[in-house]
Amino acid sequence: MHLLFALLLAVPPADLKAQGDAGLKAIRGEALSAHVRFLADDLLEGRGTGTRGHAIAARYLATQLQGLGFAPAGENGTFFQRVPFVGMTVQPEKCALEIDGAPLKYGEEVLFPPRAGAAGDDVEGELIFAGYGIAAPEFKYDDLPKDLKGKIAVVLYGAPQSDRPDFFPTAASAVYSDSLEKARRLKSRGAVAMIQVFTPRVAQHLPFPFFARQAPFESMAWREGDAPGSGYVLPGARLPFTSLQRLLAKSGQTADDLFAKGPAGKLQPFPLQLRGHLKTSFTVRTFDSENVVAILRGGERANESVVVGAHIDHLGIGPPMKGDAIYNGAADDASGLSAAIEIARAFAALPKRPPRSVVILGVTGEEKGLQGSEYFSKHPTVPIESIVADVDLDGASWTFEPFDMVMLGAEHSTLGRAAQAALSAMGMKESPDPEPEQVFFIRSDQYNFVKRGIPAVFPGAGWQDAQGNVEKRKAYDAWWTQNRYHQPSDEWVPDADYANMAKEVRVDFLLALAVALDPERPQWNPGDVFGKMFTRP
């Protein structure tokens, strides 16, 4: 059985470990700690997209890669790709959502995401409940009214989800949870605005006050010439689940009933018998930020490449919390960027380069809606058809020694073989996604490669300890989300054991190496939802 399993893998684990031995030895916890320390230093002021701190981090990454022998693969023979942005900052005192003339309180009952590039909007219309805002013929599901002309659509966050392949399996549920796509569908049916209501399930992980804390930060969309190339196409509002009953007051429906029907896919549209008036106002500016792109040329298949990516940016300077206004982003994602540097070091240390090339991609604007990676996927500085796979690094952990890993997305393609080979080589286990409701796979940069039909994987440490128990680490994960995630307290930890992080990064390196070595180009598994939904370039 073990022999058969080994034969099915892209590269047998023992061979993979032997071929990667020099690279494995090159990855050190001390180096990872040093990178995180610099990138999360107050000097960089949180690496906000388009800021001087972000530019410093981008140049740090480029300098490290140049020193390791990687060649520039950005624009005009440089390591950089310029990404043009439009930024929008909410002016809450000039925004309002009124329901039948009664206003909702900003920050407690309503928030206002901007329409991309807009200084403001002033719209009104009848409120129509439109389910999740989804039309999915492959699952025989459509909860959208046929005609929303002049109406304000009220939709629930997320999408139906089930364990059945014929009705919103986890991956499809994640794709259909995309709020930007919802807005596009609603606009195509005539809606003038979208009100999105979070659900109790979302609030278990990310309560409404979390989103309220993020609201003062600038929203962004990349530009195509003078027009936004991404972002919301409708003016909108976001409401906590506690506000839904207010919208249902005249409908005869209850919020609890809708929240129960939602996961079962039994929502139907209906008029709320209310009128809404939405007024928004934003300051608008244009600016540039940068992606970093570098390549280590491979051997006989150098015209194909595996991308190892991480995001450079974090939130920058924002509302003070406990006297600290710098959102340093040590774990999110100075850690992933540090891992990418050390994986580059590992590849550079190999006595023989693998057949495929390796691209290191540091992207901007991830925290602003995966902007930099989307821009790269639409304006690639290396041929998009040459990219066979993407390995995304977002949040490598130093807190606990990892004994298992979650390989998000690997189950959809033959990248699962590479993941298994890497884990087996390091004596580690693979665990399923412990939080599928969080739809992490569409919330980081690999999703923009998936949308171009390119198989991708998002690896991360699991929750198991040496005995296979998960309770302690599950509790810590919940604590970290509550007390560190997107807060100034996400800082470099000087007394942590970064050997833990190195162990995880070694698996990430072997995963990328397995793809670089595999004679076969990664493919979506037969009948996979991503293979059906997205076409390879």
Image: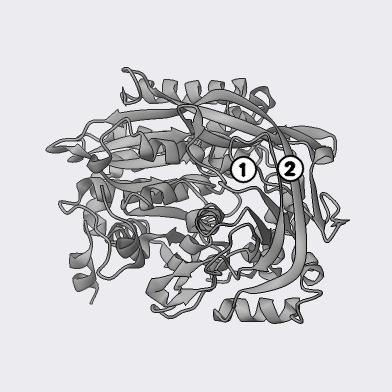
State which quadrant residue 328 falls in.
top right
Location of mark 1 (residue): 115
Image x and y of residue 122, in percent = 72, 44
Of the pair 443 and 399, the residue shown nearer to us: 443
Residue at 56% across / 34% down in the picture? 313
Image x and y of residue 140, in percent = 42, 78
Amino acid type at mark 2: Thr
Q: Are marks 1 and 2 in contact (CB under 8 Å)?
A: yes
* Quadrant that contains the N terminus: bottom left
Image x and y of residue 359, in percent = 32, 35
Q: Provide the secondary structure element on which disc 2 rests.
A: strand
Q: Vertically, is 96 above or below 281?
A: below
Residue 245 is at least partly visible in this image: yes
Of the pair 349 and 202, the residue shown nearer to us: 202
State which quadrant residue 291 falls in.
top left
Residue at 50% across / 27% down in the picture? 226
Q: Residue lying at the far left in this picture: please name it.
A: 300
Location of mark 2 (residue): 280
Q: Vertically, is 260 above or below 424?
A: below
Residue at 33% across / 51% down in the picture? 511
